[in-house]
Amino acid sequence: MIQKVASRAGWKSADLAQTESWFHRLSNEAIADFETAMRTAIASEKEMFDLDVRDFPLGEAGNAALRCVHDATQEGLGVMVLRGFPVQKHAPAHLRLLFWGLGLHMGVPRPQGKQSQFMSDVTDAGGVYRSAKGRGYNTRSKLDFHADNADIVGLMCVNAAMSGGESLIASSVHAHNVMLEERPDLVASMYEPFVFSRQGEEAPEEEPWYESPIFSVTDGQFACRHVRNHINGAQAAFPDVARLSAQQTEALDLFDAILARDDVRFAMHLEAGDLQFLNNHTQLHSRTEYEDWPEPERRRLLYRIWLAIPDAQPLAPGLRPTYKDVSTRAVRGGFRGVGITEATRAFETRMAAHHGMAMRIYG
């Protein structure tokens, strides 16, 4: 019998509005720690995949800020925003390097697309969201609520949009519970497999689509894998895959409608210098459409990193086609793409060893 999920990550919009436990303003000491780590990495002159945590030495204040991220995403509400890093003082390439280094302290970065990029620029590059190969990060479109393919997603805001581009988040735990209360007959179908498109970003050895449940519970821990755009993409691109049933479509429509409710979703404006981190298993995120600045140097820009972290929750076997490994303390997730090299695999193996994580995803 499907039961209500009890979790601190099952918040309502009003809960976040009434607390600042998801928000941490960086102290001067933490900022200094981050800047020292960044300068040390720059001085090393190492390539991205040759760097490790020793090239980003953090003091107590910097480490304390990252502990806030860990505790909030893994044991708390599932979201944390670090605010106040002075991005205007630093070159974009150096900020990118800093965010990479912070990620190395937290876990193992995961590839994010066809070219196997381990860090993405979230900016309008003219992409088309509603298309066979559409991804949201390179468009200015309004996005559906979705989860990324990693334990943690992190964003560093370098430039905010001229207007719009609000970050929207919702607890998939709470949305599940609302759906269970309103339409228990539809919730069961969300625990069954749905077909997702890989949006043309599969590795050579992968099928262009995979199956995954949207809801799952393993060892008492809930996870949600929801990307409606990829489900619709599979229906449009692959006529041989199972068609959505009327009940599945109704369930998806209801879930999306619940996520859009004002008492479920929470809106936040990410400012330049904000670092937002979300637990992808319990939180869904979206974005409003935006208008950008005419000046190229002011255009909306965020850096995105996906992370597998050592103590993330175990996942259901049905999530193996997308995560490749569902065990805790294991490197998992990401879109493998076509650009994985010996250098990137050596980097992943080295970082996995540093964090005490198994590395089994390449068979």
Image: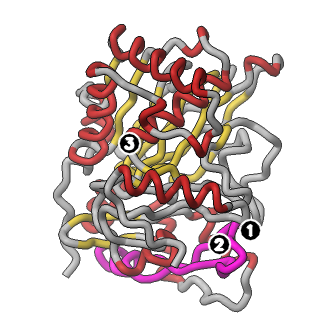
Q: Are marks 3 and 2 in contact (CB under 8 Å)?
A: no
Q: Which residues are magenta?
A: 184-213
Q: Are marks 2 and 1 in contact (CB under 8 Å)?
A: yes
Task: Quickly name the residue at label 2.
Answer: 197
Amino acid bearing label 1? Gly
Task: Quickly name the residue at label 3.
Answer: 106
| Distance (Cα) linking label 3 and label 1 | 29 Å
| Distance (Cα) linking label 3 and label 2 | 29 Å
Is 203 covered by the magenta stretch? yes
Q: Is residue 274 visible?
A: yes
Residue 250: mark in rendering: none
Check the image and report above or below for 193 versus 162: below
- In the rendered view, does 358 fall on the left or right side of 142? left
The x, y position of residue 261, in whole percent, is 42, 47
Q: Quadrant of residue 166?
A: top right
Amino acid bearing label 2? Ser
- In the rendered view, does 298 fall on the left or right side of 191? right
Mark 3 and mark 1 lie on one chain; the one further toward the N terminus is 3
Is 153 covered by the magenta stretch? no
- In the rendered view, does 97 fall on the left or right side of 263? right
Q: Quadrant of residue 288?
A: top right
Q: Is residue 267 visible?
A: no
| Kind of element beneath mark 1 | loop
| Kind of element beneath mark 3 | helix
Check the image and report above or below for 291 versus 314: above
The x, y position of residue 187, in whole percent, is 34, 74
